[in-house]
Image (cartoon, rainbow, N blue to C red):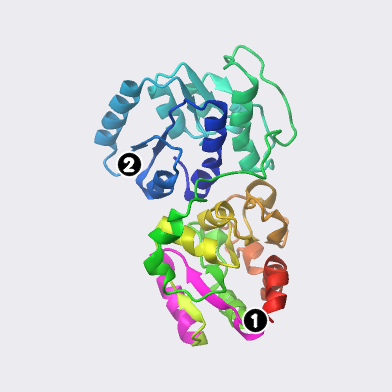
Amino acid sequence: MGSLGDVTRGLCLVSKIKTLFPKSSITWLIEPKCKEAVTFHPLIDNILVFDRTNWKQGLKDIFHKLRKSRFDCVLDLQRHFKSGFFSFLSGAKYRIGFHPKNTKEGNWLFNNTYIPYMDEFYPKIFHYLKFTEYLERSQFQTRSQPLFNSQTQTQIQTQDLDFGFSGPGLLSLAATVLSKVNTPFIAVVLGSTWITKEWSCDSYSKLIHELLKTTPLHIVMVDTMAKYDMACSIEHNIKSSRLINLVGQTSVLELAAVLKQAETAVGPDCGSAHIASAVGTPYVTLFGPTSPERTSPYGSEHLVVNKQIPCAPCYKKECPKKEILCMNSIQVEDVKKKIFQAVGAGLTLLL
């Protein structure tokens, strides 16, 4: 029930669960903003949507649906009060959550079984996979029984992770949007929901200008409507037929399709980064207030740009110093080098 990035990463558990329990039925509880990504997954059997805007009626509806479904087991992947509360409402015998020391807002009180404790820099995607590792190794032990205490990366193989976007239908769903895009191209994600994660408009403009000048690639800007004015400003300053503005024009699945077609993508630590990872596209991540060790997109851990400011990672949505040095210190040349690294031999051939 979390952010788009967390939901996208969590989708890799579905195929693992189906492998462990081929006859199982999987239901995903989600909020409307991320419903589209979950709906597309071919192995998810049912979806429950919590209408947060009308929360009183939404709570009643979800309660009845949860109890009617008679779930055997709940995996609580969010760690907050909200997800723990819904886990408890399910009435499931086995409610598996994060270790109490890894939770927030009293989340652990609502669950009765826990995966092992992991330190704060343990990669989030491997942390999620501890749930399927637990299902594989245990017999749904209760909180009074000790769990295994492995501090190593999950033993479940990760090179074959399936996030549900691998089917051929994704590109056909986004045919209209993709018709506006000329390949090959680099996708540029312009923002995040956190102000402290954002790079400046001027920096993006300089980066795009440099890429257009030094490569034959097209550049496709993507993001939500919140970044539309910024995209238009960049468009106005650069005036190139190879710069394509799709900001505010893509749904979640259309965004996934665009990112899947890209040679590489670049932008901040945000949901789009993990969608790029899920569709197998290298993503150059600009890190500031969050931890690259914890949240780098799977498969693109080597493509991080991070200036390692002493006060980072602070995990704050507003900079106490009002300077956001961690992001403003990132130089265009640093980002460009990582993009060339990501594109690699393919760009050499184009040049």
Q: Secondary structure at mark 2?
A: loop
Residue projecting furthest to the front? 168
Camera-side mark, 1 or 2: 1
Q: Is residue 146 above or below residue 173?
A: above
Magenta segment range? 212-237
Q: Residue at x 73, y 70 (%)?
A: 345
Which amino acid is tagged 1? Thr
> Horizontal and vertical percent for residue 289?
62, 55
Q: Secondary structure at mark 1?
A: loop
Q: Any magenta on residue 234?
A: yes
> Horizontal and vertical percent for residue 170?
44, 56
> Horizontal and vertical percent for residue 153?
72, 37
Residue to which mark 2 is pinned: 52
Residue 56 location, quadrant: top left
Is 349 on the left-hand or right-hand side of 129? right
- Report the number of numbered marks: 2
Q: Residue at x 64, y 52 (%)?
A: 296
Which amino acid is tagged 2? Arg
Residue projecting furthest to the top? 144
9 or 256, nearer to the observer: 256
Quadrant holding the C terminus = bottom right
Is 299 on the left-hand or right-hand side of 83? right
The mark found on residue 345 in the picture is none
